[in-house]
Structures are given as structure tokens and as C-alpha cells.
Amino acid sequence: MGRIKGKKTITGLFIRHIIWIGIETVLISACLLIVMNILISKKIAYPANSQENYLNNLEKIAFKGENIEGRLKNQYLYALFNEEGTYKKGSIDQDEAEEIYQFFKEHGTYYKERYIKVISSNKGEYYILYDIKMGFYNHFLSRFFPSPDILIIIFFILLFLANLWRIAGKFGKVISGELKRLKGITGSIEKENLEFDIPSSSLKEIDEVFHSVGKLRDNLSKSLHTQWNLESGRRDQIDALGHDLKTPLTIIRGNAELLLECQLNQEESEFVNHIQKNTELMQEYIQKLLEVNRSEEEYKISMEWIDSRSFIQDIEAYSQDLARNKNITLTYKIEEVPDKIFVDSKILKRILLNLMDNAVEYSPENSSILMQIKAEYNSLTFKIEDSGKGFSIDDLKYATKQFYCNDKSRSSRDHLGMGLYFVDIMIKKLGGELRLSNSETLGGARAEILLFDSV
């Protein structure tokens, strides 16, 4: 954990970016204020209190006895009242002018989002409406654009959001970059590749995760190597045992065959036949065991696009040969299978014939077997249903385990306990799945193969 000391934390990185947002927001505000002052100084825009200042100057002029009416006509709405409060004239009609007059007397200067300025002169009192807001001197700008202060606020919001987006993106880029490296590591583990280097991160929390993944890699590597060594040793022992047993069994079988050529009575012949039959069965056991033992590591998958019709016809022909001796009727249901399928044809053929052989073995004579083949979405499904006794509860749990044999249901003295174990291994090599159940249609067992990404 020593390498983690002195590194930045995600919280610290986040706070630093927040501070940058604050600093740059202040800079944006300062720049916009400078722009506003330039607009005012260049007489492009006038300040919010310009109308109020102008009216204050007019008030001084009126106090001196000068006429201000000409300066009001083109710029302001106003009404002139005499000392008795009678409306005389103005740019505001009489009804509204009297309303403004009464409002000012009762409530004050703020009237309908505008302000009232009263200037006394030798002609009477001028009631003038004015605004306290910025504006453009240019008539075109005043007509088609918001007031300068509104424009400044709009620009501030846009610049603030753009800056927030930029800094958030920068923060996200740092985090996503670290997460991508972490995803690369987990991807290597997923692909069973443990030969990778553990990177270092500038962020404390991410570096701690990298460190933990490194420890996980080391422990997983040790565990897998131990498991691989045990598996390799087990296979070597089985292989050695199988070959060691072959020689004495061959000798026993050969001697039994020689004994049958001698003059034996009926009872002696029966004993020798039993010896020969069971020797052959043991040789078959050993051969099957050696095949399964090799299949766990030697089979290489060769996926390719093949013609589905030719493949299915080949399976049908072999299945008919298997079923002919017991006069079993084979029924095929083929639904929506495309012309081309993506499989390892040799392995899939061996799997299907293995399942068909089981179905024939456990089905009684003159019965039926059903095979269904269906393509759905991107997967291919094979179902084989027989007319035998079906699977027991224990069969459904353990039938794919090596050497499993349950004499109560689908077993016989000739059952090797490795058929479905072999099928399960091969299906997994193809990236598929084996499902076992009982058939509602024929009452026997049902074996279902799902092959993904095959169509």
C-alpha cells in the first residue's frame, strides 16, 4: 500500500474542479461587466438610471422657470395637471392620467412596472412615466434585441453552462480513463488471461482498486495453477491406469477365446462366456474413459458455416441405423432452420448421436423417438425425446456428473455413466447449454441442446 500515499483522492479532484468553476465564473462576470461599461462609455447603451438622471436635470431646469415640455414630448409619457389637480394636456390620455395622479397621491411612485416622476413648473405639475433599465441608443437595436442587461445575463448563463460542460467533461475524462484501464484488466481476467501488469493510478481510490485486483490476480493464478496441476495429474493417472489395464484384459480375453475352442461342458462354456463378455465390457469402459479423459483437453473447436439440410439428413440416416434393430419409429420436426448454421459439425454430430444412442437404448421395442430442431432469434435448439422410463429426480441433478449411475431408472449393467458427462463437456466447449427434463409427449426423457449465436 506504500505506493498509494501522497496520491490525489476523487473527492479532492472534484473539489479542485468546483473551485475552477468558481474562479472562471468570477472571470466571466468580470469580463461581462467590462463589456457593459464599454457599451455605456461608447454610447452604444445607456445605464439603467439614465432616464432618472435625465429627469432630475429637467427638474432643475424647470425650477429655473424654463419650459421642459418640448424635451418630454418625444421621449416620455407625461400628463400636465394644474394646482387644483385638473388634467390639462399630455401624451397620456385623460382617464389614465387621472388614474396615475390618484395612484401617486395614495400609493407612491411605482405604477404598473414603471415609475412616476413629478416635476413642478410655472405651468403646473408634470406627471412623467419612466423606466429604470438599460437600453440601446440605436433604434434598431432597441427594437430587435433585449435590453443590454438582459443580454448580459443571457451571455453569462450560456458561458457559465459552456464552462461547466467543459470542466465536467474534463473531470469525467479523468475518471473514465481510469475506469477504462480497470475494465481492460477485468476483461483479461474474463478471458482467463492472468498475464497482465497492474498499472498505477494518480487517484488514490482507483489505485487501491488496482492494488486489490493485483492481489486477486496473484491468488487466482495460484489457485488455477494448483487446479490445473491436479486436473493434469488426474488425467495422467486415468490415462496410465487405462493403458495398464488394457494389457491384462487383452490377455484374459484372449485366453477366454482359446478356452472356448477346447472341449468344455455346458457349465464350463457358460463360465468362459461370462468371462469373455465381462472382459469385453471392461475394455469398453476403459476405452470410453480414455476418450472422455482426452476430450476434456484435446478437442479443438472449429466453428464454420455448414449446410443445415445436409447435416440434418446425415443425422437422420445414422439415427435410423441405431433405431432399426428395435423397430423404433423416429419422428422429426424441423422449424424455421436457415440454410446455413454456424457450428462445429463434427462435435455436434457426435453429441447428437450420443443422445440418440441413449434414447434408443432406453426406449422399448416398437416405441417412438421424437427429434425437434428449431431456430429462434440467434440460437439453435435440438430436442430428443424418448419413450423410456424418463429421468428420476436424482438423474436430473446428477446425470451430467462423471461416473453417475442410478440403477433405479435409466441405468443398466451396460451403462457407463459417462454419456451425458461427455455431452455436457462438448456442449460447453461449443458455448452452449444442455437441459434435461422429462417428455410430456412420449413419457420418457428429454435432452435439449441450446447453441447460441449459431444462426
Image (cartoon, grey):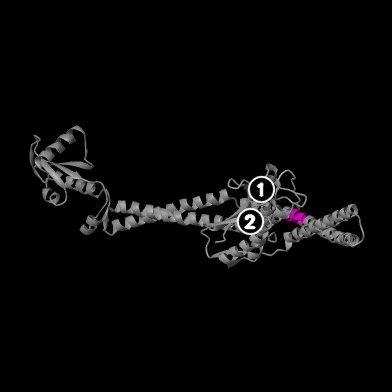
Magenta includes 179?
no
Looking at the rendered structure, the secondary structure element under dot 1 is loop
10 Å crowding of disc 2: few (<14), some (14-19), many (20+)? some
Please identify the dominant SS of the magenta region.
helix
Residue depicted at 24% across the width and 50% down the height: 50
Left or right position of 6 against 167: right
Image location of residue 91, percent across then percent down: 11, 46
* Label 2 sits on residue: 186
**Which percent across, then down, holds residue 438?**
62, 46
- Pick whichever, 326 or 77, lies toward us: 326
Q: Which residue is mark 1?
A: 388
The residue positioned 67% from the left and 45% from the top of the image is: 389
Number of marks drawn: 2
Give the mark toward the camera: 1 or 2.
1
Label whose residue precedes the other's in the sequence (1 or 2) = 2
User: For the residue marked with disc 2, what is the amino acid?
Assistant: Thr
Q: Is residue 104 left or right of residue 245?
A: left
Sort mark 1 into few (<14), some (14-19) or many (20+) by Cα contacts within 10 Å.
Answer: many
Q: Quadrant of the C terminus?
A: bottom right
Secondary structure of residue under mark 2 = helix
CA distance separating discs 1 and 2: 47 Å
Q: Residue 115, how many percent across, how many down?
A: 22, 42
The answer to whether one can see residue 384 in this image is no
Q: Residue furthest top?
A: 106
- Residue range highlighted in magenta: 221-227
Residue 103 in the figure: left or right of residue 266: left
Residue 148 visible within the image: yes
Going by the image, does 113 lie left or right of 78? right
